Image (tube, coloured by chain):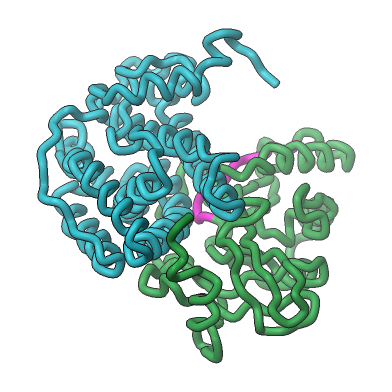
Chain colours: A cyan, B green
């Protein structure tokens, strides 16, 4: 339709949409396997919200792309290197502690990001973010509540929560590593400067970690960024399952 | 799970008692910065930035609203889409009747069904040319439930929303939720999430009945 695609904006929106989609798919893997029925329901509900957000974002991305794709084509027919989600989102569920740590870190990130995007000059993004932030607040309440319970719980739950945090912390570097895509959006008033989000995110996370009696690990740089399409080995396996039906029966509907 | 040191229900009960201020009306809408985001979803900009109170409509629009009042939510069949607060507008412009619908939760699976039933209801009432539009901004919150909707929820056995849960400083505090069956304030939260995206799961300590609570966002 439009001759010139705004490539940086497209990549930016894909990053947001893919992160929600991949995290939503991961949480969906808990269905039927959670520690208790209530947590099964909770993780499924989180997943549903995230996939709903992904749908809104990827629909927008498909329009920006202008190739006649829809959000389903973007979700089911791209290969791992074309996904631009944060590496943290694709990390395996592990035990419940690992899922909760991953969730706290990403909920706090989405919370800061969506709050800022709600005043974006891109009215479409602003509307999606203003809607998503309300859901994200609820998610953060759930995940941070659980992290406090685990960290400040038994010796075993504390050990597992700390292990999970130590293992996942290195992926948080990517959340605030601004590149030309992020900078172009910030300059255009579409997205916040990542450097400004970082202290707010850290304050939020620190507060939860303190209450959870967990130690924040030292910062480590992990420069292979999913948001540039360079993923950990886990994404391919996850997509194989997620995309199985559409790959085997193209165009299948029910 | 091995971690049982602080179960949610106990903490809720300890933190949620006797604090009427915390049980004040749910308001999680950001006040000022909503209007700007009128976006392409609603090119006319004729949405209602605040939940509607008593409004007077012209008879032609009122007729459409009456049709919409007969369209029930598939999961909570006592609530119409109007009670739920997801109809943003119904008005005519040069190209016909426009009806704006907003989703409750981004991923609510009922959204498509609701859209279809609204379409069918409008068709059979003679408005088959109506243009359905999705409106995202301002976002739906539980504040959009009408008074009528809140009463119907309660009589159906679902406690209506109380107040925002958004502040992370109130991690373990919760508002007083009254049991929709016996009216007791002695209730405890079983799970923040329930059988649909819009509900949480509670239990009454007095009459021992479990019940749904319409989440406050």
Residue shown at 44%/66% (left/top)?
A: B166
Vertical position of residue B62 compared to residue B126: above or below: below
Q: In this view of the protein, which residue sits in the foreground, B135 or A34?
A: A34
> A225 left or right of A86?
left
> A246 left or right of B205?
left
Q: Is residue B7 visible?
A: yes
> A118 left or right of A59?
left
> B38 left or right of A158?
right
Residue A24 drawn at (x, y percent): 46, 38
Residue found at the very far front of the displayed protein: A155
Q: Quadrant of the C terminus of chain A?
A: top right
Residue A61 drawn at (x, y percent): 40, 28
Residue B204 drawn at (x, y percent): 70, 75
A136 inside magenta stretch = no
Vertical position of residue A13 compared to residue A236: above or below: below
Residue shown at 64%/47% (left/top)?
A: B101
B137 inside magenta stretch = yes
Q: Is residue A119 visible?
A: no
Labels in figure, total:
0
Q: In this view of the protein, which residue sits in the foreground, B85 or B21?
A: B21
Vertical position of residue B182 compared to residue A238: above or below: below
How would you classify the magenta stretch by its main secondary structure?
loop
Q: In this view of the protein, which residue sits in the foreground, B76 or A56?
A: B76
Residue A213 drawn at (x, y percent): 26, 66
Q: In this view of the protein, which residue sits in the foreground, B21 or B147?
A: B21
Q: Quadrant of the N terminus of chain A?
A: top left
Which region shows up in magenta? B130-139
Residue shown at 21%/53% (left/top)?
A: A197
Residue shown at 69%/43% (left/top)?
A: B110
Say which quarter of the image contains residue A48: top right
């Amino acid at each position: 339709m439009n001759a010139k695609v705004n490539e940086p904006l497209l990549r930016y929106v894909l990053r947001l949409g893919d992160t929600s989609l991949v995290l939503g798919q991961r949480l969906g893997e808990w269905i039927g396997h959670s520690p208790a029925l209530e947590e099964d329901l909770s993780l499924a509900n989180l997943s549903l919200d995230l996939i709903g957000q992904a749908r809104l974002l990827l629909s927008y991305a498909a329009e920006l792309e202008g190739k006649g794709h829809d959000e389903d084509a973007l979700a089911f027919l791209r290969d791992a290197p074309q996904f631009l989600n944060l590496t943290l989102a694709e990390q395996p569920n592990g035990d419940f502690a690992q899922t909760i740590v991953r969730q706290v870190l990403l909920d706090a990130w989405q919370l800061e990001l969506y709050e800022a995007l709600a005043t974006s000059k891109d009215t479409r993004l602003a509307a999606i973010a203003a809607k998503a932030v309300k859901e994200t607040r609820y998610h953060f309440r759930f995940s941070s509540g659980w992290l406090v319970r685990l960290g400040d719980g038994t010796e075993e739950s504390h050990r597992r929560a700390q292990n999970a945090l130590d293992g996942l912390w290195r992926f948080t570097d990517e959340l605030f590593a601004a590149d030309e895509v992020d900078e172009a959006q910030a300059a255009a008033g579409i997205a916040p400067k990542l450097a400004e989000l970082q202290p707010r995110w850290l304050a939020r996370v620190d507060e939860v970690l303190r209450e959870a009696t967990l130690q924040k690990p030292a910062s480590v740089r992990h420069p292979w960024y999913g948001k540039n399409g360079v993923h950990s080995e886990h994404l391919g396996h996850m997509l194989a399952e997620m995309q199985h039906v559409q790959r085997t029966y193209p165009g299948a509907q029910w | 799970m091995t971690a049982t040191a602080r179960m949610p229900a106990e903490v809720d009960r300890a933190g949620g008692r006797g604090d009427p201020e915390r049980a004040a009306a749910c308001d999680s809408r950001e006040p000022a910065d909503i209007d700007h985001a009128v976006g392409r979803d609603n090119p006319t900009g004729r949405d209602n930035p605040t939940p509607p109170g008593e409004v007077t409509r012209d008879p032609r629009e009122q007729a459409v609203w009456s049709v919409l009042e007969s369209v029930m939510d598939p999961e909570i069949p006592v609530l119409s889409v109007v009670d739920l607060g997801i109809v943003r507008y119904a008005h005519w412009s040069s190209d016909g009747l426009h009806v704006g619908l907003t989703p409750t939760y981004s991923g609510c699976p009922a959204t498509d069904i609701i859209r279809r039933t609204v379409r069918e209801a409008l068709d059979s009432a003679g408005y088959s040319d109506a243009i359905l539009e999705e409106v995202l901004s301002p976002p739906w919150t539980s504040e959009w439930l009408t008074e009528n909707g809140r009463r119907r929820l309660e009589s159906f056995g679902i406690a209506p929303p109380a107040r925002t849960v958004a502040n992370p400083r109130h991690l373990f505090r919760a508002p007083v939720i009254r049991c929709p069956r016996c009216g007791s304030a002695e209730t405890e939260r079983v799970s923040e999430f329930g059988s649909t995206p819009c509900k949480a799961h509670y239990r009454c300590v007095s009459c021992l009945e479990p019940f749904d609570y319409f989440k406050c966002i």
